[in-house]
Structure formats: structure tokens, C-alpha cells
Amino acid sequence: MWHIRLYQPADRAAVFQLCGDTAHFGDPIERLFDARELFLDTFAAYYTDVVGDHLWIADDDREGVIAYLMGCPDTRAYYRWFAPYTRRIAWRAITLRYRGLFTRKTLAYIWRYAHLRVPYLDLSPYPAHLHINTRAGLRGGGLGTALMSAYLDQLRREGISGVHLETSSENTIAVPWYEQLGFQLLQRTPTSLYQPSVGHSIDLLVYALKL
Ligand SMILES: CC(C)(COP(=O)(O)OP(=O)(O)OC[C@H]1O[C@@H](n2cnc3c(N)ncnc32)[C@H](O)[C@@H]1OP(=O)(O)O)[C@@H](O)C(=O)NCCC(=O)NCCS
């Protein structure tokens, strides 16, 4: 049996594990990037360490954390936090704290990412954002729907005007689901960022929902 609840600090390792295991379009991050800890410090730490009160967990009696929705009510606050935080990440990288950083795969991804150009998009009507993932083998069982409903209800209670998310044409199950939930496509940006791991160009997509 599973139930939906808010994150607690004791979940951090399990959330990081699931995030790393699903970050490449539902597959492990290592398909794209060998430095898992670097990825998690960069991508996940804000949601666990700063806005854990908007991180929703699907908790199974036997399996523990089987799905999460990482929410953030104020994306501008996230960017304000992130800028100085990058110095900490850089220091850890320079002091060789990240395994897998100096592989060809990781460095090539960092290079491509540094050259990624996404046109500016005004997301101020949609200040909140989210990331959601369910453990492989448990998808399609209602976990995502339950997490999404808990988070959207929370944002509505808090009077937040809208929420956005970033996904891609490669997330073939998630995209029609977001549209079914009422999210509108705001931006489509073709990119070869994931060419080595998926074998073709994809479109980065930004969706948003008014609350
Ligand atoms: C997208 C995702 C988070 C949804 O979570 P979930 O636990 O599968 O969610 P649910 O079981 O509530 O399913 C939500 C919807 O997804 C679709 N869906 C789920 N599994 C599906 C499957 N195997 N085939 C087709 N559609 C499926 C359905 O539309 C479903 O809604 P419905 O049951 O009302 O028709 C999950 O499938 C996942 O982790 N996918 C891989 C990673 C990913 O794409 N993450 C999103 C990154 S932007």
C-alpha cells in the first residue's frame, strides 16, 4: 500500500536515488552523464534542502519512496538561491569530490549544455514549477496523478497564480498527460543536447497551467 505525504529530511537519500535512477527520460542519469552526485547536487538539492515543504512523496509500506513531485512555489527565489550555490558546486568539482566528472561523456554533455540557447520566455504568470518521476515498473498505477493533485491543491490553497514545467518530446507518456491535465505548451526549442544518448534531436518543451 502507498500513500502520498510531504517530504521529510530522512527521505533525502531515497529521493536522490530515485531522481538519479529516472533523470534521463525515466532512465538512469548515467545514460547521459557519469557524475551522478554532481547532477543531484545541481538538480535536486534545492527541492530537498530549501523547499522540502513543496516536495511530495509517494511512500510504499515496503518499498519506501516510489515516486516524487519536486515542487517550487517561487521560481525567481530558486534562481536567486542557485547563483551563489554554483560556486559551492564548482569548489566541490575543483577539489575532485565528484566521481565521473572527468569522463568523455560527462565533459561532452557539460560542453553541449553550456552552448544550449533557449529563447527568453516570460514565466511570471506561472511562478511555481515542478519535476515529477515514478520508479520504473510502477508507472501507470496512479502515483503521478495523486502527487500532481496534492501539489496543485497546495498551490491553489497558497494563492499561487500558475505553475510551469519543462519536459521534452522524448517524454512520450508525460507530454499527453500534462495536456490532459490542462497544461498549455508555451515554448518548443529543438536541440541536439541529448543526441548521443537518444540518437536523434529532440524538442525541449515548456508547459504551463493557470491555477
Ligand atoms: C510521467 C510520470 C511521472 C507519471 O507518473 P505515473 O505514476 O505513471 O502516473 P499515473 O499512473 O497517474 O499516470 C498518469 C497518466 O500517464 C499516462 N500513462 C501512465 N502510464 C502509461 C503507460 N504505460 N502508457 C500510456 N500512458 C500512460 C496516462 O495518461 C495516465 O493517466 P490516466 O491513467 O488518467 O490515463 C511517470 O510515467 C514517469 O516517471 N515517466 C518517466 C519519466 C518522465 O517522463 N517524467 C516526467 C519528466 S518531465
Image: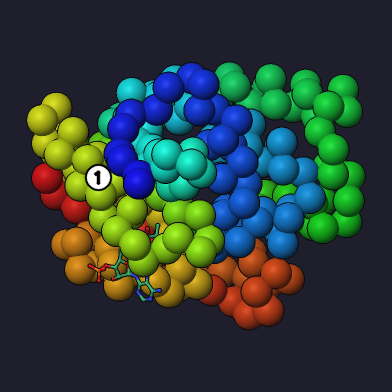
41 horizontally vs 92: left or right: left
**Near-viewer residue (58 or 180):** 58
Q: Secondary structure at mark 1?
A: strand
Residue beneath the point at 82% across and 58% down: 105
Q: Identify the colour scheme used.
A: rainbow
> In this figure, what is the number of numbered marks?
1
Q: Is residue 37 above or below residue 22?
A: above
**Near-viewer residue (132 or 194):** 132
Q: Residue 201: image x %, image y %?
A: 59, 76
| Quadrant of picture, ligand 1 | bottom left
Q: Residue 98: image x %, image y %?
A: 81, 33
Q: Is residue 156 above or below residue 186?
A: above
Which three-letter amino acid code belongs to the residue tagged 1? Val
**Near-viewer residue (9 or 189):** 9
Q: Is residue 205 above or below residue 163?
A: below
Give the labeled residue for mark 1.
163
Residue beneath the point at 88% across and 56% down: 104
Q: Residues within 10 Å of mark 1 (few under 14, many from 20)?
A: many
